[in-house]
Amino acid sequence: MTTTDHNVALAEYLCATLPKDDALDLWLKQHCPPAHHNQVRGQVTEVVDDATAMVENEPGGVRFTPEFWQRLHQHLAVKHPWLTVASVRGMQSYLGWYCWHEGLNAPDAS
């Protein structure tokens, strides 16, 4: 498995804002040897869990600025060196929805 494979798997998992197990399962069946399914699934779901934990602990709420995305990538890349900047950007829709749903967005500075 290459780094690209993991990033494509992550994109498939988050293909429609919310994580989709069936989309990831289909991608794994089509592109990944069966012996690697559990490993890739584990790494993909773990990076989403780690991103979710980071936004849950963001002091003052989450502001989706370029600096935030850079910090998120740096934080996640320590544990998930396969993760690309593009994949972090691919999590925007999910994390935006999650923060809205859980009330984690920073208050407006008006």
Image (cartoon, rainbow, N blue to C red):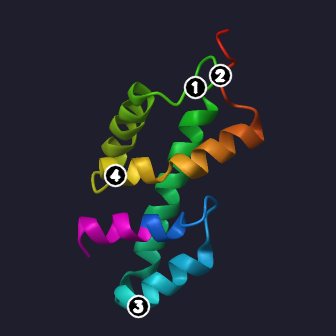
Camera-side mark, 2 or 1: 2
Helix, strand or loop under label 1: loop
- Report crowding for label 2: few under 14, some 14 to 19, many 20 or more residues within 10 A (C-alpha): some
Q: Name the residue under label 1.
A: 58
Q: Which residue lies furthest to the front in this view?
A: 110
Whether residue 7 appears in magenta in the rendering, the answer is: yes
Q: Where is residue 4 in the image (x, y as percent from the top left)?
A: 27, 67
> In this view of the protein, which residue sits in the foreground, 47 or 10?
10
Which residue appears at 52% of the width and 31% of the height? 64
Label 3 and label 2: CA atoms lie apart by 40 Å
Helix, strand or loop under label 3: helix
Q: Mark 2 points at which residue?
A: 106
Q: Name the residue under label 3.
A: 30
Q: Earlier in the sequence, mark 1 or mark 4?
A: 1
Do the CB atoms of the residues marked 4 and 2 lie less than 8 Å apart? Answer: no
Q: Mark 4 points at which residue?
A: 86
Picture quarter containing residue 75? top left
